[in-house]
Amino acid sequence: MAIHKIIESLLVKFYPDGYDQSDPRFTNFITSLSSHYTTFERDKKITEHAFEISEKEYGIAMEHLKAQNEITRHSIEKLKDAIIDLAPDKANDFNASDDNIIHIISFLADLIKKSKALELDLIKAKEVAEKAAHAKSEFLSVMSHEIRTPLNAIIGTIELLKFHKDLDTVKRELLRVMEISSENLLSLINDVLDFSKMEEGKITFSERDIEIKAFLKNLKLANRVRAEEKGNNIKVMLDDEIPDFVKGDDLRLGQILNNLISNAVKFTKNGTITITATLEKQTEDYVDLYFEIADTGIGIPEDKQKLIFERFTQANNNITREYGGSGLGLTIIKRLLLLQGSEINLSSRVGKGSKFFFTLRFKSSSSVATATTLYEESKSDLNNISILLVEDVEFNIFVAEMMLNNWNARVDKAENGAAAIVKVQQNKYDLILMDIQMPVMDGYTATQEIRKFDTKTPIIALTASISIDIQAKAGEVGMNGFITKPFNPNELYTIIKKNVLV
């Protein structure tokens, strides 16, 4: 019988002389007790081993828990910082010492809710602003047409009256007053519309060949009469290195330079206006030209030199009364140049004059000048060219017909687009002058219908709007060009010559 060592030691202690192994009850007791001891020790070892394993796992779990707590603490701090950065105006309402994630998330959820509400308000405000901008654009388009239509008749009539030789001095002076007033009104309308288009981001730039030297000489001739009236002399200084042609937007360049020249003439009396153009840099791809308009006029005080580029602003209140102007010209020049990557600069001294200058980059052109074309003050004969005038406004019909008849053109008339289609089907014309806005059928629709059976006759749009969208649509429907009302005889003759006499 195997007896546990502890039981065996106890038997030796209490039975030094041995014990009676023949007693079965005693023997069974010792055997059972020894078995229990053995089982107890075995269970104890198993328990201790299990405890050791659990203790190690507990230690590992505690380390993981500490790491997770540190990550949570760091995340909460970052979340609180983000909340404060996100809504600094709500920082006072936020308990930065509160580490309760439920409270923080609740506060964040409230911010998100308010942010969503603000976002909806902004979306609604944006929609309202877009509708207002569209309404403004529509209003300006309508007003442009409504103002330019009678203005076209006024300016055209003035141009026609200037050809009369029997006008005495008083009548010619009155005619001149009317001419200046109508030109000032047209300039004001153009400035307001241009500024509005720039605010809406609707300004685009074309790329056409520009014969710079002839272009600047034309500007001089266009401003010569007004300059001579004030006793001024206009000079043009051209760098011989300037290429014959460059590619750019001649209309915008003309707008910039003509505005500067007009200002120089306006604020100078018995002096000199100098137009300078020099070559700064030329590569295979581009040409940098420096332009300068200098005058010997009244000059601009130093503290007002930045102010004059702000909208509706003059150097002082008396300038508007004495010299006129909207206060938008220089603002428009500044923005047009900025949109082309340039800027307007000014140097001026009171009583000594002013100098406006800028550098503008153009694309290189492969065109070569053949002959210089200058501003034509006298018109050539149109040699019985047949022209269909499609227009619904009686005064505009009268003015355009008189201009065309003065050049010996043969003029036929149609009061709307539908009537024009019938005329073109029945007759052959060298050119069609097509108004865009007419009753019964507009100019766009009429042009599309005409192009179904006549693709060669040039059609020139007559429009009171200078919108890029309208100009683009004129090309899309098959028109060969456009002329903006009010137009002067030179503009009308030039576009006819370009499309018929070539």
Image (spheres, rainbow, N blue to C red):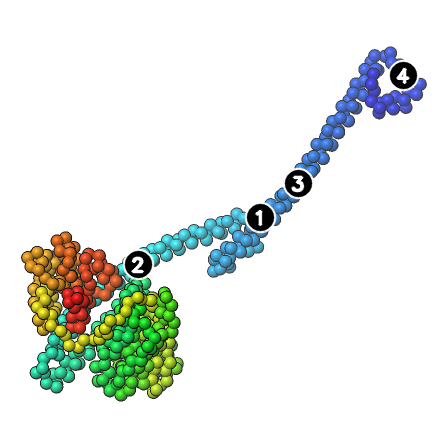
Residue 361 is labelled as none
Give the amino acid at mark 1. Thr
Q: Mark 2 = which residue?
A: 130
Secondary structure beneath label 3 = helix
At label 3, counting other C-alpha atoms closer than 10 Å, the crowd grade (few under 14, some 14-19, many 20 or more) is few
Q: Is residue 205 visible?
A: yes
Give the amino acid at mark 4. Tyr
Q: Looking at the picture, does residue 420 appear above or below residue 151? A: above
At label 2, counting other C-alpha atoms closer than 10 Å, the crowd grade (few under 14, some 14-19, many 20 or more) is few
Sequence-first tag of 4 and 1: 4
Which part of the image, by quadrant, shows the N terminus? top right
Residue 323 pos. (x, y %): 26, 81
Q: CA distance from mark 4 to mark 1?
A: 70 Å
266 or 123, which is in the foreground? 266
At label 1, counting other C-alpha atoms closer than 10 Å, the crowd grade (few under 14, some 14-19, many 20 or more) is some
In front of the other: label 1 or label 3? 3
Query: Are the residues flagged by discs 3 and 4 in contact, CB closer than 8 Å?
Result: no
Q: Mark 4 = which residue?
A: 19
At 58% across and 51% down in the image, what residue appears?
A: 74
At 36% across and 74% down in the image, what residue appears?
A: 279
Q: Looking at the picture, does residue 471 appear above or below residue 69? A: below
Residue 415 left/right relative to 470:
left
Q: CA distance from mark 4 to mark 2?
A: 114 Å
Give the amino acid at mark 2. Glu
Q: Mark 1 = which residue?
A: 72
Query: Are the residues flagged by discs 1 and 2 in contact, CB closer than 8 Å?
Result: no
